[in-house]
Image (cartoon, grey):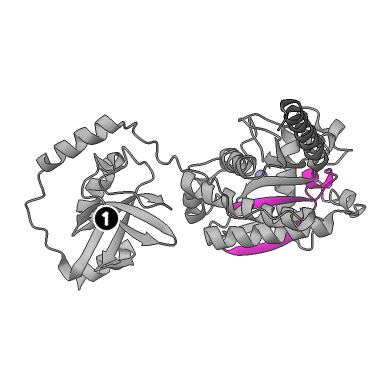
Amino acid sequence: MNKKIGLLLCWVIFFMGGVLCGQTEQKPFKVVIDAGHGGHDSGCLGARSKEKDVCLSTALKLGKLITDNCPNVKVIYTRKTDVFVELYRRAQIANTNKADLFISIHCNAAENHSAGGTETWVMGLHKSEANLAVARTENAAMLKEKNYENNYEGYNPNSPEASIIFSLYSNAYLSNSILLANKVQRNMVSTNHFVDRGIKQAGFWVLYKVAMPSILIELGFLSNLENERYLIQDANQNQMATAIYKGFVEYYNTVTNHHLESTPATPLVSTEPAETPSTVTENEKEKEEKPVITPTITEKKFHNDVHFKVQFLSSPKKIALTDSKFRNIPEVNCYFENSLWKYTAGDEPTQAEASAILKEVKKLYPDAFLIAFHGDKKITVAEANALLKK
Ligand SMILES: [Zn+2]
């Protein structure tokens, strides 16, 4: 081919490519991720945690998943750090950015500590006093603002008539909000196995003010010890963020005609627990040192095949028992339960002996706790102690 014609052809292909690319370029889909509370507003409190922290961590994880896996979606956060952001400002951020979707992440609390579960809210008029109470608690965040009266049209979340303001609300985005709520709620409860408290409606200020489909997720109850134990773990927050992500992608595919995979190609990687930095050389050193570790010589007698152990870590991925993170843990073992690998220390015939190990393990893993087995079957510590008396 003549050089000149070749060059010309290259140029035409380059130019056409540019034109075609330009034609297929789409306006990004914008999603606002709103981590509830922050700064001097802690939100509700668990025994060991604050709502603002669980919300922020899960929100950032959700945002990372979307950013890493959805090329045409832009993530906007109302906060990325532990700062106070006024409720009205959150809605303003979403509206001025002309977002397509608003996802607010919160945690619940109740006086009844056995109450637990996940629920997803859309804006609307409450159908029960219980629903009103949840919205009122979340709206009370505005009371932490200096001149809150100026920003909320005279609305006072503590006044019994307060919800009247919401009765004038007509929601152009309700059906899409419910569509998203259903997808998120379904993915959430099939992931965390919490009680499914369903999709609900009430007057949440932050949802009231956003001009786009919106949901508010109450991940679980920090006042419920079991819920809290799950909610505060990094690996579990990854799972919940992934569940919300899946719901989001299903919604996104429905409303935009895209066909993204709901399972993220780039998943979140758990950083839990604070891993001891390990290098290849350290690992190698460890392998060399390994035969030096003396096995327990004293033979333990297990009455009625009852075993007490200390559970200190759970992970969706299997970790080798020889991993460097276990180097200072005695008798590491694992079992599989509820889609998680759970790691244990010690294997003791009595609760007292396991408690001594628990005390040591807690120095490295403060969330560690006692568990018990009857043979291979997991039982409660109380059941184990009852079996020992037989
Ligand atoms: Zn909240």
Q: Quadrant of residue 304?
A: bottom left
Residue situated furthest front in the rendering:
2
Which residue is the site of mark 1? 309
Choose between 213 and 301: the one closer to the eye: 213
Q: Is residue 341 left or right of residue 268?
A: left
Q: Is residue 280 left or right of residue 298?
A: right
User: Does any atom of ligand 1 lie closer than 8 Å to the CB of label 1?
Assistant: no
Q: Residue type at mark 1?
A: Lys
Taking the spot 78% from the left edge, 53% from the top edge, the residue there is 256
- Vertical position of residue 334 compared to residue 81: above or below: below
**Circle 1: element type:** strand
Q: Is residue 304 left or right of residue 53?
A: left
Choose between 163 and 346: the one closer to the eye: 346
Choose between 38 and 382: the one closer to the eye: 38
- Give the residues in magenta: 195-221
The answer to whether residue 110 is seen in the rendering is no
Taking the spot 62% from the left edge, 55% from the top edge, the residue there is 262
Where is residue 74? Give x, y as percent: 72, 38
| Residue 200 within the magenta-colored segment of the rendering | yes
- Vertical position of residue 146 compared to residue 157: above or below: above
Residue situated furthest bottom in the rendering:
390
Quarter of the image where the C terminus is located: bottom left
| Residue 95 within the magenta-colored segment of the rendering | no
Where is residue 1? Give x, y as percent: 70, 33
Taking the spot 39% from the left edge, 51% from the top edge, the residue there is 314
Taking the spot 81% from the left edge, 46% from the top edge, the residue there is 159
Where is residue 319? Give x, y as percent: 34, 49
The answer to whether residue 358 is seen in the rendering is yes
